[in-house]
């Protein structure tokens, strides 16, 4: 499945509790992407090592050479990495969204500012662990926000945190009780989950976008509503104009560019 942003639900754990790793230095951490519309240079974050190493592995094997940007939405993001978009692609290439996945690596200091590199994934209804696609990625374009719009984004984030958390509590409660061999009705599961949810809400404050990130979202732009729900594992350090150029192309009703935009080559460049 190529469409990844359906049923967007935020991370069911307060973002204040997720790890605070920072980008570090790595000889393999800078990636050069040559596309049919220009060149982009990206720095991978060492604070998301599973995604970094997976991406480097795919680059070294040449997996991305020849794939298309198959989903493009102006003022949102540009998406690529589906092996099926290669010309003459083999049928045994990984489906990448729902058959080849890697664990989420949510880090509050990596967020969806303009130029952020993040992993695609399926929605929470079929992917409650929010595992990332093994190959598909997107680069954020986004828009700038004012203070009121950021407040609305916070409301959206907190609503989805609570909804997602409640769904997770229900699943964990049901799994735990059924593994014990006990018989329980759906109504009883709901009651137990509701009590746990009440206890959580009584002890946790709503999420607030950090001030430094608010400044970036107001002056540079991005997509704050996705923070904490899709793993951000790098950022564009050269070529934001190329991201804008790709995001501006004409697309069809399924957000696929009318004229194919290819990744000609991705390679590692030393720092």
Image (cartoon, rainbow, N blue to C red):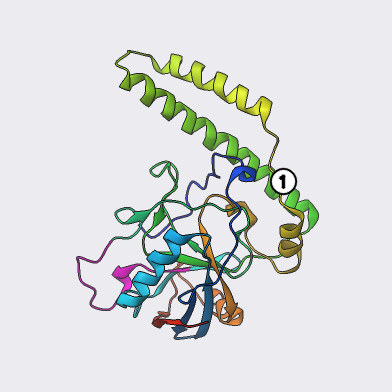
* Residue 205 shown left or right of residue 100 in the figure: right
* Residue 223 shown left or right of residue 246 in the figure: right
Question: Which region is colored magenta?
Answer: 79-94
Task: Please name the residue shown 32% across and 72% down the image.
Answer: 85
Looking at the rendered structure, the number of numbered marks drawn on it comes to 1
Task: Please name the residue shown 32% across and 13% down the image.
Answer: 182
Mark yes or no: residue 219 visible. yes
Task: Please name the residue shown 69% across and 38% down the image.
Answer: 206
Farthest right residue in view = 147
Q: Looking at the image, is 182 positioned above or below residue 36?
A: above
Q: Looking at the image, is 99 positioned above or below residue 93?
A: above
Residue 266 % position (x, y): 41, 80
Residue 80 falls inside the magenta stretch: yes
Q: Quadrant of residue 114?
A: bottom right
Q: Which residue is at the front of the view, 241 or 106?
A: 106
Residue 110 % position (x, y): 60, 59
Q: Which residue is at the front of the view, 197 or 54?
A: 54
Q: Which residue is at the front of the view, 224 or 269?
A: 269
Mark yes or no: residue 253 visible. no
Magenta stretch, main secondary structure class: loop
Q: Label 1, on which residue?
A: 208
Q: Which residue is at the front of the view, 254 or 197?
A: 197
Residue 107 % position (x, y): 57, 53
Q: Looking at the image, is 180 positioned above or below residue 172?
A: above
Label 1's element?
loop
Residue 87 falls inside the magenta stretch: yes
* Residue 20 shown left or right of residue 124 in the figure: right
Within 10 Å of disc 1 (Cα), the crowding (few <14, some 14-19, many 20+) is: some
Residue 173 % position (x, y): 43, 24
């Amino acid at each position: 499945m190529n469409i990844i942003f359906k049923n967007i639900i935020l991370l069911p754990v307060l973002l204040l509790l997720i790890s605070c790793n920072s980008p570090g230095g790595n000889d393999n951490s800078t990636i050069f992407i040559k596309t049919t519309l220009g060149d982009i240079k990206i720095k991978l974050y060492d604070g998301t090592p599973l995604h970094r190493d997976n991406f480097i592995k795919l680059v070294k094997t040449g997996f991305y050479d020849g794939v298309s940007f198959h989903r493009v939405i102006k003022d949102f993001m540009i998406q690529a990495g589906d092996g099926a978009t290669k010309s003459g692609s083999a049928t045994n290439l990984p489906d990448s969204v729902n058959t080849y996945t890697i664990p989420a690596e949510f880090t509050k200091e990596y967020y969806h500012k303009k130029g952020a590199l993040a992993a695609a994934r399926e929605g929470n209804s079929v992917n409650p662990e929010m595992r990332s696609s093994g190959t598909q990625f997107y680069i954020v374009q986004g828009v700038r926000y004012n203070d009121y719009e950021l407040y609305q984004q916070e409301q959206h984030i907190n609503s989805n945190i609570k909804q997602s958390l409640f769904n997770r509590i229900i699943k964990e409660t049901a799994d735990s009780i059924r593994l014990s061999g006990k018989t329980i009705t759906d109504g009883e599961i709901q009651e137990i989950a509701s009590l746990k949810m009440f206890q959580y809400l009584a002890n946790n404050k709503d999420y607030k976008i950090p001030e430094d990130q608010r400044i970036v979202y107001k002056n540079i732009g991005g997509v704050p509503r996705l923070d904490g729900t899709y793993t951000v594992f790098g950022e564009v350090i050269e070529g934001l104009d190329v991201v804008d150029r790709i995001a501006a192309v004409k697309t069809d009703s399924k957000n696929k560019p009318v004229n194919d935009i290819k990744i000609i080559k991705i390679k590692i460049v030393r720092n």
